[in-house]
Amino acid sequence: MLKSVDDSPEERVPLSRDRVLRGAVAVADAAGIAALTMRSLASELGVKPMSLYHYVASKDEILDGIVDLVFSEIDLPSPGGDWKSQLRLRAVSARRALGRHPWAIGLMESRANPGPATLRHHDATLATLRSAGFSVAMTAHAYALLDSYIYGFAIQEASLPFNPENVIETTEAIMQHFADEYPHLAEMATGHILRPGYDFGDEFEIGLSVILDALTRSIPGHGETN
């Protein structure tokens, strides 16, 4: 909820760069990235807009910072262990972070001035792939494939017209328009989506397993070599 600039000084937490960035995340989480302006951020923090410029030089710097905060929420993989388990941990954590901050999906790889958490994240992921035995080129291919899947799934999940709470009601309403004309869609709805306990998010783990198993064959000594 946006705060009034008329809040008494005694109730305010002193400004800092970290507080400014976390306030920006709060605005974006509540209303989307388009709602994030210097004015809306100042309102969220209960300060005058000009006071923000003591901590951030521009909106671009804010975007750099909040993307870095999202990367800091993603578990880092550890090179040298079981690479598939480590990359699964990273993928699941990334999906959860993007679920909390759906506005970040289109921004994660867009920043020309990545912050320290972003750089640590990328370096740890590359190190995990390299230590698993992937060549430099195949490491690049594997990383691109994994991120395409993670970000793509996050976009699809955020765009669905239903969630686990209303999936039955929404799906049945949609089925009324195609059940007779599109039998395979009806079959999918009745035979899978409308079954007790259905959660679209479960599809993430299945697809991730397929990708990780396929990538194994690209490690020298484990099948095909690149």
Image (tube, helix red, strand yellow):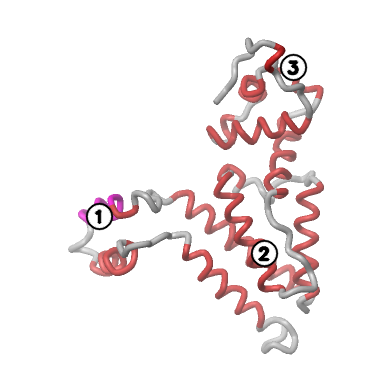
Q: Is residue 16 above or below residue 190?
A: above
Q: Which mark's residue is nearer the viewer, 1 or 3?
A: 1
**Circle 3 residues within 10 Å: few <14, some 14–19, many ≥20:** few
**Circle 2 residues within 10 Å: few <14, some 14–19, many ≥20:** few
Q: Measure the C-alpha gap from mark 1 to mark 2.
A: 37 Å
Mark 1 vs 3, N-terminal side: 3
Of the residues shown, which amino acid type is indicated by label 2?
Answer: Ala
* Towards the viewer: 204 or 89: 89
* Towards the viewer: 206 or 150: 206
Q: What x and y, as percent, mark residue 120?
A: 80, 55
Mark 1 vs 2, N-terminal side: 2
Q: What x and y, as percent, mark residue 128?
A: 76, 69
* Towards the viewer: 76 or 55: 76
Residue under circle 2? 144
Q: Residue at x 66, y 22 (%)?
A: 45
Of the residues shown, which amino acid type is indicated by label 1?
Answer: Glu
Q: Measure the C-alpha gap from mark 1 to mark 3.
A: 52 Å
Q: Which mark is residue 172?
A: 1
Residue under circle 3? 50
Q: What x and y, as percent, mark residue 138?
A: 73, 74
Question: Could you say whether the residue bearing mark 2 is in a helix, strand or loop?
Answer: helix
